[in-house]
Image: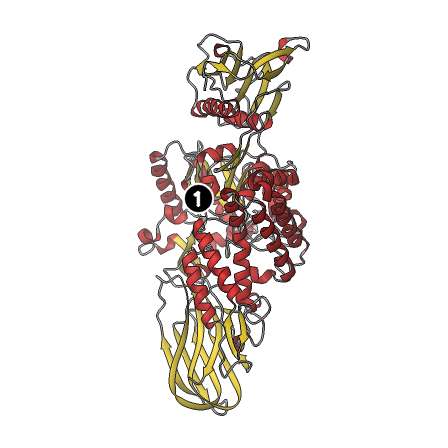
Amino acid sequence: MKTSWLSFIFLAFIHFGNAQTASVQIASQKVNANRFQIVTPLNPSPAELKAANELQKYLEKISGIRISITDDQEKMRTCEFVIGRSTRVPESIDLRNMDPDGFVIKNFGTRVILAGGSHKGTLYAVYTFLEKYMGCRFYAPDAETIPVQKNIRLPELNYSGHPAFKDREVYYTVMEDPDFLDKSRCDLMAWGNSRNWGLWVHTMFRLLPPEQYFTSHPEYYALFGGERRKTQLCLSNPDVLKITIDTLKKLMQDNPDAKYWSVSQMDTYGHCECPECTAMDQREGSPSGSYLEFVNKLAAAFPDKVISTLAYQFTRKPPLHVKPASNVNIMLCTIECDRRRPIENDTSAGSFLRDLQGWSRIASDILIWDYVIQFTNMIAPFPNFNVLQPNLQMFRKYGAGRIFEQGCHRTYSDSQELRAYLLSRLEWNPGFDVDSLIADFTAGYYGKAGSFMRKYFRDINQAASAAGQPLWIYSSPQQETTTFLSQEMVKKFNSYFDQAEKAVQGDSALTARVRKARLPLRYAILEIAKKDILGPSGFLELKNGKYRTRQETVQQLNTFVKQANLYGVRSVTESGLSVDDYASETNRFFKVAFTRHLAVGKSYSTTSMPASKYSADGPGSLTDGKRGTTNYYVLWQGWEGEDFEAVVDLGQPAEFNYVSAEFMQDLNSWIFYPEHVVISVSADGIAYSDTAVFDKPVDQSKKLFIEEAGKKISMTTARYVKFYARSLKTCPEWHIGHGGKSWIFVDELIVDKR
């Protein structure tokens, strides 16, 4: 490569009254390289220096020529790209009062100004110039489109931009790459990723650790259910305020550059019900009253810092009278919202919209914590594209200045690359045309497979939007078999992916992208098969009088596991279930999922009904022969804060020698294995004798498991079998939900002759 010659030159300026309005044309010609340079300030900031280097790098990729970088103390040349706060930026461009991430792209004759605000505005000016005028695209860390151009022509340059939100984060694995993060015009805020945030959410026990204070000072903690518990803090206690201030002072001394400090509730319920806290909350009409009173006092103690606090779950409703101090940030969370329709369309009592409107009237600094992933099944299809833009527009409409879109970190999830691309652009400008963004991405990222991928994204999102049921972030594919994951839709989607793979056959990179995008559908097919079991989408088929696992289901699982491990799926659920553990659990399920036993199809009665949202397929679910997986939403029935008791009527006396009940433990969901189980039998349904007793202390080291309380007994003849399981009733002291009601989840009640 000839580095002394450039392949492009400013050919001419077209004057409109003066040189400041001249347009610029660039064309392929050989000209002495000394006529060109990239100019930075004498002492450039890190963002300005990176902007210059990035411009140099990508112009070289486009043209094949490397332009030198110098500072504004060097002699002016004929053609220059002026970067950042250089002395060569005309006074008519006011950088001092520009938005920190805002920028301007403007030519003055053959001088092109790429400059911006104090944060990363100049860097964003360079990336916007490369995209808007050079045709570059940055789809993912490993997917860029850089057009090689022998002939470059620029129009008159007079473009500026600034973001709709001051801080913007899209919490996905692809954003771990710092260069791609910058190209996406996003920030880092969450969980210590930003030096600007000293503490990030659920911090109260970090400020007053229960292991340090609870034994000697239980009064520092919430009075909940009539006793002091390690659920939240008692915010009316003056010592709690003093200790919090002292702890914050030390933390701030150790991290003086951090401006934002979160003082916020723990990720559980159980706010303080002492007389003082209750009086504040009643006066304010919400527990947010006592929290905001407390946080305002901290804000007064640290006037040069911003104290952030959550408006989340029980504190989401704004207070009636108290207002956030000017240096208080409200972090308002959308966790309860339906993702099938725009949030603004939900005007029901207790709606998020009402709370957002309330906070917008009293708070000057609002950060929206929005959720764009299905947590219970992070790899499952979650078609919420239709609400991304209207929700962001609504957040902006009601004054939110910062936005945090929570996907998942350090693992892969549904259409992650496209979501990150869409969300990052919409966080910058919620008015962008979404269809154009999707068309651009699918064509650039998937190549010849793009048209089929576009059809898939279009159809699954339209089906979800048209469905008559909500789309929750805690759900499962099994709950969508009548909507976007019906048999007909799954068949159509599979055909799109088949055509997409065929279109890019021979291109290993594009094939990998298509296969990676197909993983959520493969996962959904497996999960639906676990629910349908004996049905057309199930995994069992009857051959020669025996139930066998369908070979296509086995192949689907093997393909999913192989490709998921290959493409960086580290967990399939929020609880951290790995791909290999998912495979083991699924294979175990295939073996035990349908159990023929004497109680199948027999009636039973329970002392109380299960919770309506955890009632499986209704009456008969506990004796249908179907066994559940670790997804408690499907095939499991749950009882909250009470024991479980059921009596199975076999219809007539029967001979058997095995009895069992299957229970689950999922500590993240407050589900505990029963500590005491008794199975007893009766001939008349009146007099019972115990035949199996199980005592199992709660094992807090085992967060998620399924286990039978089962036993082979002496051969017994009886008609009635009673199952009793003693629940913990409330979460134990060591659990995050201490004091809150615990759950007991039951699957199959088994009576058998083995």
Against 509, residue 112 (above or below) is: above
Against 750, residue 151 (above or below) is: above
Residue tagged by mark 1?
263
Estimate the x, y position of residue 124 in percent, counting from the top left.
53, 27
Q: Estimate how packed mark 1 is, as few (under 14), some (14 to 19) or many (20 or more) residues with alpha carbons within 10 Å.
A: many
Against 359, residue 227 (above or below) is: below
Q: Quadrant of residue 248?
A: top left
Can see residue 387?
no
Q: Quadrant of residue 108?
A: top right
Q: Quadrant of the N terminus?
A: top left
Estimate the x, y position of residue 366 in percent, counting from the top left.
55, 39
Estimate the x, y position of residue 654 in percent, counting from the top left.
48, 90
Q: Specify how the rendered protein is coloured.
A: secondary structure
Against 212, residue 25 (above or below) is: above
Residue plotted at (44% across, 85% down)? 753
Q: Is residue 460 left or right of residue 524?
A: right
Q: Is residue 148 left or right of residue 704?
A: right
Q: Quadrant of the C terminus?
A: bottom left
